Image: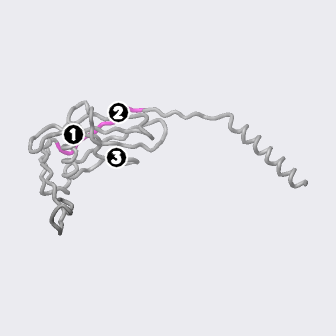
Amino acid sequence: MKHLIFNKFFLAIVMILGIISCDDRELVTTENTAAPISMDLSAEKLFLDQHYPDNPALTVTWSPAQYTVPVEIKYVVEASADDKLEAPVVMAQLSGSERSSAFTTSQVNAAAIGVGLKADLAQKLYIRVKAHLGSNSLIATSNVTSLTVTPYIVIKTYPKFYIVGAASAVG
C-alpha cells in the first residue's frame, strides 16, 4: 500500500514539474536574410541531338539561399516558355548543400517539349531556381535566365511482340 501511494505521489510531482517547465517557450522565427539567389547556366545555345540522349547538355548553378536559422533548404529548378514562368515544368528537386544540377540531352528535351516548344526550331527556354523550406514556405526565387534551345521530336519505339492481332499489346 505504501508503495502504491509513493508511486502516485512521485507521478504527481513529475507531472507538475513537466507543466511548469513548459511555460516559458522560445519562439523561433525564420526569415530570408539575403537578396534572392542568383543563378547561372553553362550554355547560351543548345542544339539537342537525339542520337546522344545521355550526354550532358546543361548545368545550372546557383548561390545558396540564406535564412536566419540554419535549416535544410530545398531547391526546385523550373523551366518555362515565357519569362514570367506562369506554367513552369519542374526539371529537378534538390535538397541539402547541392548548388548545381546537371541535365542530359533527353532531360532538357523533355523540359522543352513539356513547356510547349516546337521541335527542330530554335526557341527561348527560361529557367529559374526556387528555394523553400518545408512545405513551400519562405520561398526565395532566383533571377530568370534564358537560353536558346532546339529540341527534337521524340520517336516512340514499340515493344517487341510475338503474336499478331487484337490480342497483342499494340493491336
Q: Nearer the viewer, mark 2 or mark 1?
A: 1
Residue 115 image label: 1
Q: Residue furthest right?
A: 2
- Residues tagged 2 and 3 counted as in contact (Cβ below 8 A): no
Measured Cα–Cα span from mark 3 to mark 1: 17 Å
Q: Position of residue 76 (x, y in %)?
A: 33, 42
Q: Quadrant of residue 28?
A: top right
Instruction: Categorize mark 3 by other alpha carbons within 10 Å: few (<14), some (14-19), many (20+).
Output: some
Which of the two labelled residues, at mark 2 and mark 3, occupies the earlier sequence position?
2
Q: Position of residue 30 (x, y in %)?
A: 49, 34
Measured Cα–Cα span from mark 2 to mark 1: 24 Å
Q: Residue furthest left?
A: 120
Task: Say what secondary structure mark 1 lies in.
Answer: loop
Q: Amino acid at mark 2?
A: Pro
Q: Quadrant of residue 163?
A: bottom left
Q: Nearer the viewer, mark 3 or mark 1?
A: 1
